[in-house]
């Protein structure tokens, strides 16, 4: 998200290593900024002796990148309480599943933050969920809408990470679905890891659309029952071409089907605030928690030497106190006295003018002008 180069990335790795060793929790961006600032100071540089160091130039670049990240919505992404992935796998009292809609507003303006949030969720599931094997039904079906944003300007390392996570997370009982307009939006290394496929209608209005349609048709298994060109362009709303992986790992023939809408309810709540507070997750995620973290701990560390220095200076000044201390206090200079007298005289002259006839007329003119400007603006 910071767009860091190799040197800056290595520097961040050093920062996180130092935070782990010193027990400094980095909970939000302000903690990371405080730690970077501290490690760039003279005291912080001394603590990095032997494990490398941070240049002031690198720290400056990272701090500016943090500002850009905050302006792009990063402040809301970091902090506590952290989302517990198990809360996405709740069921109703009758055993039916609960759909959790995670809203990321204006995702088209923040594709990097969007992809990072989704990849973090997948990584947390892979880390926390136990091995489940081949289940009759998954613990969770994860749908990535606007999936093309996930791969915009993606690096090779990022694509490799996504492909590995998608491939291995199946054994945790999690199914992953990428939702997008055309299969071209999903890179081939990711597309090759996906088994089930639901393809709605495609339209070909331009030569580029026709090429995309031909490429999409080539990715489906050969069918003796359908002309895939005609099928994909002729389907209506709610219809789809479906193929899934069999138990042997071979894709099944294409089936033209109509999708039945689920039996569920969706609509605005009568009282949004009351509904939100009635949710079992409101108490857990309703308000941000400000726990003690690296920012407060580093501030206390920096204040300790200053307090010690102030405590040592106080007895020294008291020892030389008494009449000697009062005698050592310098008297105001004569020039300061003259300046104070001149200022007092100026204030008196202005006050006298405002109380005169001319001053009152000027005051009325100023007030009329002010109200005239306000009237024009209103």
Image (cartoon, rainbow, N blue to C red):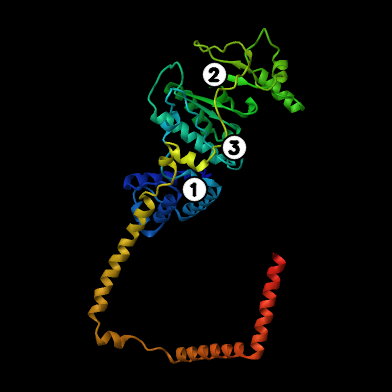
Counting residues from the start of the chain, the first of labels 1 and 3 encountered is 1
Whether residue 7 appears in this view of the structure is no
Front tag of 2 and 1: 1
Image mark for residue 153: 3
Residue drawn at x 59%, y 25% as measured from the top left: 188
Residue named by callout 2: 195
163 or 101: nearer the viewer: 101
Query: SS at mark 2?
Result: loop
Q: How many callouts does the rendering have?
A: 3
| Name of the residue lying farthest toward the right | 206
Read off the residue under disc 1: 75
Closer to us: 319 or 245: 245
Residue at the farthest top position: 224
Could you say where residue 22 lies in the image, as x and y percent from the top left? 32, 48
Sooner in the amino-acid sequence: mark 2 or mark 1: 1
Quadrant where the image shows the C terminus: bottom right
> Closer to the camera, 5 or 316?
316
């Amino acid at each position: 998200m910071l767009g860091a180069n190799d040197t800056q990335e290595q520097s961040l790795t050093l920062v996180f290593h130092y935070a782990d060793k010193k027990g400094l929790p980095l909970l939000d961006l302000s903690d990371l900024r405080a730690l970077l600032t501290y490690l760039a100071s003279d005291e912080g540089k001394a603590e990095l002796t032997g494990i490398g160091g941070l240049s002031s130039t690198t720290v400056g670049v990272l701090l500016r990148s943090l500002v850009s990240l905050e302006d792009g919505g990063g402040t809301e992404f970091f902090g506590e309480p952290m989302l517990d992935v198990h809360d996405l796998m709740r069921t109703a009292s009758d055993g039916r599943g609960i759909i959790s809609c995670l809203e990321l507003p204006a995702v088209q303006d923040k594709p990097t933050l969007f992809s990072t949030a989704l990849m973090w969720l997948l990584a947390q599931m892979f880390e926390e969920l136990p091995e489940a094997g081949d289940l009759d039904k998954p613990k969770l079906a994860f749908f990535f809408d606007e999936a093309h944003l996930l791969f915009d300007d993606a690096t090779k390392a990022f694509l490799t990470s996504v492909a590995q996570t998608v491939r291995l997370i199946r054994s945790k009982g999690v199914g992953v679905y990428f939702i997008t307009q055309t299969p071209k939006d999903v890179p081939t290394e990711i597309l090759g890891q996906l088994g089930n496929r639901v393809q709605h209608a495609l339209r070909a209005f331009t030569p580029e659309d026709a090429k995309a349609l031909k490429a999409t048709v080539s990715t489906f298994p050969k069918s003796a029952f359908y002309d895939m060109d005609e099928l994909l362009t002729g389907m209506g709303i709610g219809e789809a071409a479906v193929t899934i992986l069999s138990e042997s790992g071979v894709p099944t023939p294409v089936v033209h089907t109509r999708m039945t809408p689920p039996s569920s309810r969706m609509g605005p709540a009568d009282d949004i605030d009351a509904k939100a507070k009635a949710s079992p997750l409101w108490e857990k995620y309703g308000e941000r928690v400000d726990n003690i973290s690296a920012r407060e701990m580093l501030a206390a560390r920096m204040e300790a030497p200053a307090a010690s220095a102030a405590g040592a200076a106080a007895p020294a000044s008291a020892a030389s106190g008494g009449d000697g201390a009062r005698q050592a206090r310098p008297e105001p200079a004569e020039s300061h006295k003259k300046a104070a007298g001149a200022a007092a005289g100026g204030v008196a002259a202005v006050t006298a003018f405002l109380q005169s006839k001319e001053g009152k007329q000027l005051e009325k003119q100023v007030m009329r002008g002010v109200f005239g400007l306000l009237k024009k603006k209103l």
